[in-house]
């Protein structure tokens, strides 16, 4: 916000107090027109420029209420008429649940025991994009004959000059420049919407149309078409898989046949034939030979053992009780005859003596039978020995054959390894062929569309709606009306704020006195000599931002905005203390210390008076403190001549980043004062509006005891930059009346200066040199 010292309620009084008694009515009118005047019954008010006066804004809104009411009522009527003219649209919706509906019995054998994971959010979003696909939209348009309806094809409604005109300016597209398919698709997607319900796997399909039946029918058609599209995709996937598998199966069949032929060819070439149970013939032969050899050995051992046992029985005279002997038919008959003879002998022995011929005959017959039994047992023993020798020869022959088979097997081990490799390759090709055949059968079974369940099902079908979904009459009318009301009010408030904070407010603060000076120059000269100059107290006073009453200027109470006759005093000579006014001010500011850390020198004085005063005051203060003078007006010739480096950069170059603090600070030729210029000649004054300028001033305040700001008339400078924790030194014009000076002091205090000092007159170059230690200004 810029300087704005004057407020309604006291502007008129200040201007009237600034006028001399003999001023004509025309001059009073000119002074009144210099600033806006308030009504006589408004209370006097002096508010800081940075405060937001709600009462002023309220009065501005009340004063311009017609600019608010008329547009609001007009927009209300237009919006009400528009929502009643627009053709209503009806909306219907269908809902689809996305889940895994695949039957476990329809999965491949290897996947029947696996659990299928549920679909994630990305999968549901992908299904939404599938619902909104252009292929599905074309099918729905064709199925419901939407291209034949004027609602979806604007060309059927006829030529529209407005749309064609807007298309020329690039605002819209001319329907006649589009193909029929593009026109219908644009209208279709304008009325169609699909989205997923948050934190669920439900897809909502919404469709709007001027015909409620059509809206419901199209929504249901989109849901059905989506399911059919999914089923067709699965069917196409199964068909493509079966086609691919069929080609691979044909290739694998050829590969398996080739592998089997290579195995058989190598087996026949290497004589590695296979016997029963896929056992190589050589191994099978060795097994059989080994078995026969074991049997022959067993027979040999058995015969040898039996023959030896029979011989031992014959030699010992014991009864022959071997199975081979007992099982002989001859021995069995001889044993029966012996038993019969023994029975007869026992019978005859009971009546006859041993020497009886019959007894002797019977004993001789029994002895002959025993001899025959022993001879027959000997024959059996000798036959067993022959059998043992035969078995031994067979064992030797089988052992020779087995050894020969082992030699052949040992020589064919390398070929057997190659054969097994060929067999493994043939088996792998055969297994792959069998797996492909199984998958081919499953894919062929899945080609049936009924056997391919989709990942979604319709849980809610669209119904015919009787309530229009567009336009929403009440919300549209309320929003349009409230928006117009707020917009018109905002425009008025913005204009009022811009008027209050417009640049050049400081210049307007000096406008009343300047207008009087220009109109009544002869009278002002006399009045300037008549009225005594504002004197500083002889002793320095400590000024504080919290105690504005310590200012050397007397406080004036607000006066009502009413005209009265000002009194013009007789001309009197200037007091002698006026010569030492600048010395006393410098001493007081140095004594104030931190309270006068920042001093703003400004005023309505013409020419370079403000700069001369600031430089002279700084030179006097530099005797006891470190002082820097900051030029905020322009590249003043006074400061340029006083600087030891007239071509040094200034604040404008610092704001642009083209210079540093060390480069912009120069020294005064005649004192210890440091000087910071506004910028090189021709700089852009807009850089002095940068917010970084306040940071630069704060940096100087950290280094120097006192920072003097040469603000000139402060027409286009930010008020916060000049007033924040600062005292003001006002350099008036020589013809400025005393009442105008007092009013200006009050206004500057109201703006935010902690203390305001009004000089009696500007410091001219001829008055810059004083006696004593005072430094002469350049």
Image (cartoon, rainbow, N blue to C red):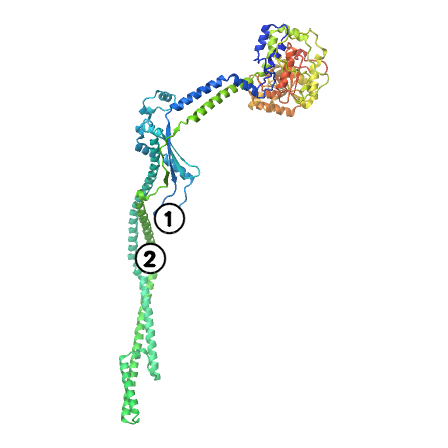
Q: Quadrant of the N terminus?
A: top right
Q: Secondary structure at mark 2?
A: helix
Residue farthest to the front?
Answer: 466
User: Residue 60 versus residue 381: which sits nearer the camera?
Assistant: 60
Q: Which residue is mark 1?
A: 111
Where residue 209 appears, as percent x and y from the top left, is 35, 29
The quarter of the displayed image where residue 777 is located: top right
Q: Quadrant of the C terminus?
A: top right
Where residue 717 appears, as percent x and y from the top left, is 58, 18
Say whether marks 2 and 1 touch (CB < 8 Å). no
User: Residue 141 versus residue 366: which sits nearer the camera?
Assistant: 141
Q: CA distance from mark 2 to mark 1?
A: 41 Å
The quarter of the displayed image where residue 321 is located: bottom left
User: Around disc 2, counting alpha carbons within 10 Å, would you say few (fewer than 14), some (14 to 19), or many (20 or more)?
Assistant: some
Where residue 748 appears, as percent x and y from the top left, is 63, 17
Q: Which residue is mark 2?
A: 415
Residue 330 versus residue 131 in the image, above or below: below
The quarter of the displayed image where residue 139 is located: top left
Looking at the rendered structure, the number of numbered marks drawn on it comes to: 2
Q: Secondary structure at mark 1?
A: helix
User: Residue 365 versus residue 644: which sits nearer the camera?
Assistant: 365
| Relative to 507, 189 lies left or right | left
Identified at 47% across, 23% down, the residue is 482
Residue 715 versus residue 232 in the image, above or below: above
Disc on res. 602: none
| Relative to 182, 617 lies left or right | right
Where residue 95 appears, as percent x and y from the top left, is 38, 37
**In this view, the mark in front (2 or 1):** 1
Sequence-earlier tag: 2 or 1: 1
């Amino acid at each position: 916000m810029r300087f704005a010292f004057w407020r309604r309620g006291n502007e008129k009084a200040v201007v009237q107090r600034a006028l001399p008694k003999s001023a004509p009515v025309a001059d009073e009118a000119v002074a009144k027109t210099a600033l806006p005047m308030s009504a006589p019954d408004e209370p006097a008010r002096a508010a800081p420029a940075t405060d937001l006066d709600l009462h002023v804004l309220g009065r501005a809104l009340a004063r311009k209420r017609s600019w608010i009411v008329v547009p609001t009522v007009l927009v209300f009527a237009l919006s009400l008429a528009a929502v009643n003219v627009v053709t209503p649209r009806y909306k219907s919706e269908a809902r689809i649940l996305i889940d895994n509906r695949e039957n476990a019995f329809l999965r491949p054998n290897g996947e029947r025991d696996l659990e299928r994971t549920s679909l994630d959010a990305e999968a549901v979003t992908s299904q939404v994009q599938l619902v909104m696909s252009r292929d599905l939209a074309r099918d729905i348009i064709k199925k419901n004959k939407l291209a034949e309806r004027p609602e979806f094809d604007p060309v059927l409604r006829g030529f529209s000059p407005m749309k064609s005109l807007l298309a020329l300016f690039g605002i819209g597209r001319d329907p006649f420049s589009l193909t029929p398919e593009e026109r219908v698709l644009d209208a279709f997607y304008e009325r169609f919407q699909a989205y997923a319900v948050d934190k669920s796997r439900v897809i909502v399909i919404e469709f709007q149309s001027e015909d409620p039946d059509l809206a419901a029918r199209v929504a249901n058609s989109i849901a059905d078409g989506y399911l059919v599209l999914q089923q067709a995709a699965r069917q196409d996937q199964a068909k493509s898989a079966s086609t691919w598998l069929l080609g691979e199966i044909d290739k694998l069949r050829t590969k398996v046949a080739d592998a089997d032929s290579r195995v058989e060819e190598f087996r026949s070439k290497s004589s590695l034939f296979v016997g029963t149970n896929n056992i190589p013939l050589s191994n099978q032969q060795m097994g059989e030979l080994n078995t026969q050899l074991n049997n022959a050995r067993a027979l040999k051992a058995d015969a040898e053992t039996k023959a030896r046992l029979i011989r031992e029985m014959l030699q010992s005279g014991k009864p022959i009780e071997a199975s081979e002997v007992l099982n002989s038919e001859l021995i069995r008959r001889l044993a029966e005859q012996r038993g019969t003879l023994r029975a007869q002998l026992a019978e005859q022995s009971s009546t006859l003596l041993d020497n009886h011929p019959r007894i002797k005959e019977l004993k001789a017959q029994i002895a002959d039978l025993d001899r025959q039994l022993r001879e027959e047992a000997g024959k059996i023993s000798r036959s067993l020995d022959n059998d043992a020798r035969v078995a031994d020869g067979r064992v030797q022959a089988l052992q020779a054959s087995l050894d020969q088979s082992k030699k052949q097997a040992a020589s064919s081990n390398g070929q057997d390894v190659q054969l097994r490799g060929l067999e493994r390759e043939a088996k792998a090709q055969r297994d792959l062929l069998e797996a492909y055949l199984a998958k081919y059968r499953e894919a062929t079974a899945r080609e049936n569309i009924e056997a391919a369940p989709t990942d979604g099902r319709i849980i809610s079908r669209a119904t015919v709606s009787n309530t229009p979904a567009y336009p929403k009459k009440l919300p549209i009318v309320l929003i349009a009306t409230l928006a117009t009301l707020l917009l018109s009010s905002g425009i008025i408030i913005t204009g009022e704020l811009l008027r209050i904070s417009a640049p050049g407010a400081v210049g307007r603060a000096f406008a009343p006195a300047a207008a009087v000076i220009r109109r009544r120059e002869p009278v002002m000269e006399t009045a300037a000599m008549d009225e005594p100059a504002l004197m500083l107290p002889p002793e320095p006073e400590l000024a504080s931002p919290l105690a504005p009453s310590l200012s050397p200027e007397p406080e004036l109470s607000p006066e009502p905005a009413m005209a009265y006759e000002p009194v013009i005093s007789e001309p009197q000579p200037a007091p002698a203390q006026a010569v030492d006014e600048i010395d006393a001010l410098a001493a007081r500011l140095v004594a104030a210390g931190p309270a006068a850390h920042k001093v703003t020198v400004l005023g309505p004085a013409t020419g370079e008076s403000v700069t001369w005063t600031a430089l002279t005051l700084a030179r006097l203060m530099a005797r006891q403190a470190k002082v820097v003078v900051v030029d905020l007006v322009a590249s003043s010739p006074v400061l340029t001549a006083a600087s030891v480096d007239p071509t040094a950069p200034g604040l404008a170059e610092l704001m642009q980043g083209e210079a540093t603090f060390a480069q912009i600070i120069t020294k005064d030729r005649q004192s210890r004062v440091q000087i910071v210029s506004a910028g090189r000649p021709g700089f852009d004054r807009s850089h002095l509006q940068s917010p970084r300028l306040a940071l630069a001033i704060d940096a100087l305040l950290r280094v120097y005891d006192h920072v003097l700001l040469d603000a000139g008339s402060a027409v286009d400078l930010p008020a916060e930059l000049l007033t924040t924790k600062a005292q003001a030194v006002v350099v008036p014009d020589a013809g400025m009346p005393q009442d105008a000076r007092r009013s200006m002091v009050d206004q500057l205090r109201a703006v935010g200066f902690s203390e305001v000092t009004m000089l009696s007159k500007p410091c001219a170059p001829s008055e810059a040199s004083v006696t004593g230690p005072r430094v002469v200004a350049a």
